[in-house]
């Protein structure tokens, strides 16, 4: 059995952060049943451009493999009945909605414990279910701004800049998955579930990590750096070679000594101004012109083999295609394929979460309401019961 094959999760999820978090749980074997609101066409991720066909997009395919879909209008009495029957037979309710919505639609532990005392309710919201920003919508870009990320990113002479990926969304998905697994462990140990109140805001602020410690403890004022340089480790940044860019990092003193040997600049290694982390940081304006001139004098094909042979942390700055073509990606099982009736073979990256043998039987993301029969059979509903629920608007109109 896969690690989570005995776990059933009801997911009221949409867009990126929630589906990203739960796709890793699905990859680990959890049965993830997406509850899609028929009034809005289901998960809005289905319609994200540019690669869209009807109710399916490659964006949606990325975050929803190995899941099931049920169209269910839980605002109706009939839809709520089906939802509550699912709660009785499931381990967790997973959602990513605005902070005030879980209470409004009744999906917190306090709302569901009478149905299943061991249910774990994981709510991933923009700002959390408490605090003055509780009712505000939260999106990755907004959170990168409010949490200070953009003030740290970009060129010093340019505008504040967001990261190239939705890292608040994705990091929050991982945090929610970790929180859910902790809740499931406690529920199975104690027989009592509870709430996981996770937010994009909490995740984004927590990821400020050591710059936050420096700022609060020592009055540090972060600034954006040239060439994506580390704020204190020198050298640790991008350098331009004759035909492209590379990253070189000296996070240990031994790497600095190896670097000056590769560059054939023993004089830099012997220079007292550059003899330690602190001194290289203090004298970076004197040191970096030497390093930039050295790297600019030759090609990536010259420098990278020498740096790697010497054990100096380094890499080319790849584009996306180059990154995916690296043999390491295939060797680590990070590239997977699913078959789709419109898109054909969908190639995508897999989960980095590891335990036991890797999964190879990935299923495409579900069509909307594709698994109604499976779910109603799971709940033991007769055909007449299903028809009555449908007539009452449980599955939309």
Image: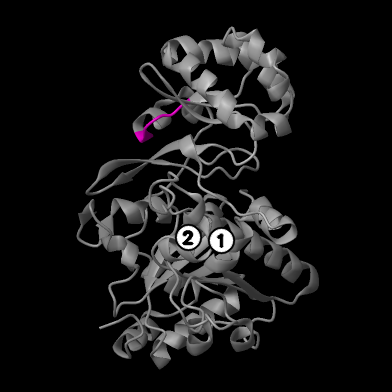
Q: Is residue 317 magenta?
A: yes
What residue did someone put label 1 on? 204
The crowding category of the residue bearing disc 1, from other C-alpha atoms within 10 Å (few below 14, some 14 to 19, many at least 20), is many
193 shown above or below 167:
below
Q: In which quarter of the view is residue 257 placed?
A: top right
Q: In which quarter of the view is residue 307 placed?
A: top right
Q: Position of residue 281 (x, y in %)?
A: 65, 34
Looking at the image, tell me whether mark 2 or mark 1 is earlier in sequence order. 2
Q: Position of residue 247 (x, y in %)?
A: 51, 27
Left or right of 224? Residue 165 is left
Q: Please state the extent of the stretch shown in magenta in the rendering.
A: 316-320
For the point 54% across and 36% down, the residue is 229
For the point 38% across and 28% down, the residue is 322
What residue did someone put label 2 on? 144
Q: Position of residue 197 (x, y in %)?
A: 61, 74
The crowding category of the residue bearing disc 2, from other C-alpha atoms within 10 Å (few below 14, some 14 to 19, many at least 20), is many
Element class at badge 1: helix
Tag 2–tag 1 contact (CB < 8 Å): yes
């Amino acid at each position: 059995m896969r690690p989570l094959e005995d776990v059933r999760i009801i997911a009221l999820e949409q867009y990126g952060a929630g589906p990203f978090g739960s796709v890793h749980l699905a990859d680990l074997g959890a049965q993830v049943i997406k509850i899609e609101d028929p009034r809005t066409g289901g998960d809005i991720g289905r319609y994200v451009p540019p690669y869209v066909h009807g109710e399916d997009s490659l964006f949606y395919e990325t975050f929803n493999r190995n899941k099931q879909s049920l169209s269910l209008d839980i605002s109706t009495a009939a839809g709520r009945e089906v939802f509550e029957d699912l709660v009785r037979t499931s381990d967790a309710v997973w959602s990513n909605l605005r902070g005030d919505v879980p209470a409004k639609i009744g999906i917190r532990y306090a709302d569901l414990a009478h149905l299943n005392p061991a249910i774990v309710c994981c709510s991933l919201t923009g700002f959390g279910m408490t605090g003055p920003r509780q009712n505000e919508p939260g999106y990755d870009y907004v959170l990168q701004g409010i949490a200070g990320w953009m003030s740290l990113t970009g060129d010093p002479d340019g505008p504040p800049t967001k990261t190239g990926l939705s890292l608040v969304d994705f990091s929050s998905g991982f945090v929610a998955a970790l929180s859910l697994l902790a809740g499931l462990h406690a529920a199975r140990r104690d027989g009592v579930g509870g709430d996981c109140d996770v937010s994009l805001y909490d995740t984004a602020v927590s990821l400020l990590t050591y710059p936050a410690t420096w700022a609060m403890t020592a009055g540090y004022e972060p600034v954006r750096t040239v060439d994506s340089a580390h704020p204190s480790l020198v050298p640790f940044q991008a350098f331009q070679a004759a035909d492209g860019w590379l990253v070189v990092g000296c996070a240990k003193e031994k790497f600095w000594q190896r670097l000056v040997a590769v560059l054939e600049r023993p004089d830099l290694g012997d220079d007292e101004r550059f003899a330690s982390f602190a001194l290289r940081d203090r004298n970076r304006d004197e040191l970096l012109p030497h390093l930039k001139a050295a790297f600019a004098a030759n090609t990536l094909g010259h420098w990278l083999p020498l740096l790697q042979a010497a054990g100096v942390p380094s890499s080319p700055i790849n584009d996306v295609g180059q990154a995916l073509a690296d043999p390491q990606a295939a060797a680590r099982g990070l590239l997977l394929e699913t078959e789709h009736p419109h898109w054909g073979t969908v190639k995508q990256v897999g989960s980095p979460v590891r335990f036991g043998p890797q999964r190879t039987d990935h299923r495409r993301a579900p069509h909307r309401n594709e698994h109604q029969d499976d779910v109603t059979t799971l709940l033991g509903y007769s055909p007449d019961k299903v028809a009555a629920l449908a007539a009452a608007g449980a599955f939309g109109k």
